[in-house]
Amino acid sequence: KFRPHLYFNLGRILGFAVLGGLIGLVGAVFRPSANLLGLLTVAVGGVMVFFGLKLIEIFPILKDKSITLPAGLARMLGLHKDVKEYSGGSSMLMGSLTFFLPCGFTQAMQLYAVSTGSFWQGLAIMGLFAVGTAPGLLGIGGLTSAFRGHKARIFFMAAGLAVIILGWQNIVNGSRLFSVGSAPVERAAMTDDVQIVRMTQLGNGYSPRVLNV
């Protein structure tokens, strides 16, 4: 029962490393704005809350609602079949594709990888992130293999509550990245031909938000 989790995490580590290098290259030519980062973070948080609500199973209206892969990709992975046969290769592929799942922790590391503008740094960041989180995922995988019936339901409800909390934190943090209109620009102070920058970190942002140096 545990073997699929091993293949899944191996594929996740390899896939995260390669894809992390690719988004590092993307960062060399494209730097997302604060508003775009905020929008992505809020969207990811919303999806996390949606899946968390499905896991706790207290809203019947969500039972048949789902966010699915594009039909072409699902067919390629064999997810459209009624009877699915297990293979180590498929488990590794599914593990690597979790790179695209809405996860606040993963997204934070992806943004860090993008900011490097380097293939090798992006590869190292996402590869090491996958290695560091593998023990936790293997532990959860072991629990889901062991739990059955009522215990499994309690486990997934607890997991759903945790996902909802993390998703809400994503939404709150993402909303703080939005800026409406142009922020006032403050000129850095000049003392003895030296410019001194002072910025205060507040609960809802920075003051001043923009400094002219």
Image (tube, rainbow, N blue to C red):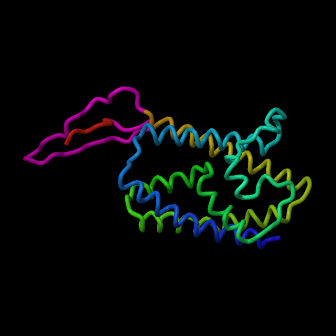
Q: Is residue 17 left or right of residue 158?
A: left
Residue 131 can be seen in this image: no
Q: Position of residue 165 (x, y in %)?
A: 65, 43
- Give the vertical position of 137 relative to 104 (above or below): below
Q: Quadrant of residue 161?
A: top right
- Give the vertical position of 53 relative to 122 (above or below): above
Which quadrant holds the N terminus? bottom right
Looking at this view, name the residue that lies furthest to the right.
149
Q: 27 and 45: which one is in front?
A: 27
> Residue at (74%, 62%) from the top-left corner?
140
> Residue at (17%, 40%) from the top-left corner?
189
Q: 74 and 176: which one is in front?
A: 74
- The range drawn in magenta is 179-207
Q: Is residue 181 covered in magenta?
A: yes
Residue 213 can be seen in this image: yes
Q: Quadrant of residue 34?
A: top left
> Residue at (13%, 42%) from the top-left corner?
190
- Give the vertical position of 85 relative to 112 (above or below): below
Q: Is residue 72 left or right of residue 213?
A: right
